[in-house]
Amino acid sequence: MAAEHPNPQDDSLPHRNPGANAKAVTIRRARTGDVAAVRRLLDQYVHERILLDKAPVTLYEDIQEFWVAERVEDRAVLGCGALHVMWEDLAEVRTLAVDRELKGAGVGHRLLAQLLETARELGVSRVFCLTFEVGFFAQHGFVEIGETPVDTDVYSELLRSYDEGVAEFLGLERVKPNTLGNSRMLLHL
C-alpha cells in the first residue's frame, strides 16, 4: 500500500508561519544557475551540523538530482532537495533545506512530495533519509529503522561507491562523526 503524501500543489498544509505564503512558490527542477542559492541555503544548516557540507563541485555534479522551491514574484530560490538513486529499488532524500524565514510555511512538504513523486516515476519502491527532522518525515509516512535496509549482496556492491552519502547510508566508520544523532528513516512507496 502506498503511503499517503501531500500533493506538491496542495497549499492546504498547516502553516506555522503566517507571514510566509507557500502559494507564491513553485517547485521546479534545479539548474546550474541555482547552485549559488542552494549553497546559501545549505550554509544556514551546515554550521549547526544539521546538514553535511557539500563542495560547490559536488553540487554542480549532482544538480540533476535537485529540485528547488522558487518564489514566483522574484524567482528567488527558497528551498531545495535532492533524490539520489542508490539501487534498483532504493533512493535517498538528500539536502532538503528551506530558507529559515519560510520554515513552517509548507515549502519543505511540497519539496519532499515532489521528490517522492520523482521516486515513483523512476520505479523506486523505497526511499531512505538520514535526518534530525524525524517528525517532519514521519508526517510523510517515513518510519525509523535500525539497520541498513539492504541485503548483503547489495551492501557489497554499494561499498564500491565513492559517494559520501552512500558511505553515510551504510554507516561506515569513517563517516560516523558526521552522522551522530541522526535517525535513519525509510518509506515504502
Image: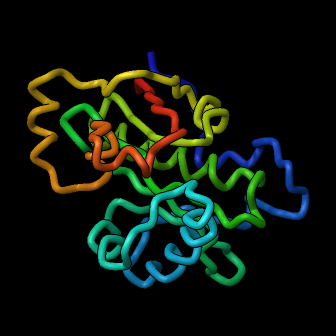
In terms of depth relative to the viewer, which is nearer, 78 or 46?
46
Q: Position of residue 43 (x, y in %)?
A: 57, 72
Image quarter of the N terminus: top left
Q: In the figure, residue 171 lies in which quadrant?
A: top left
Number of dots carrying numbers: 0
Query: Which residue does the image show at 61% across and 50% down from the upper left?
Result: 110
Residue 92, placed above or below residue 53: above
In terms of depth relative to the viewer, which is nearer, 25 or 126?
126
In terms of depth relative to the viewer, which is nearer, 169 or 86?
169
Q: Is residue 69 left or right of residue 104?
A: left
Residue 48, placed above or below residue 146: below
Q: Position of residue 120 (x, y in %)?
A: 36, 37
Q: In the figure, residue 75 lies in which quadrant?
A: bottom right
Image quarter of the C terminus: top left
Q: Is residue 90 left or right of residue 160?
A: right
Query: Which residue does the image show at 75% across and 62% down from the upper left?
Result: 102
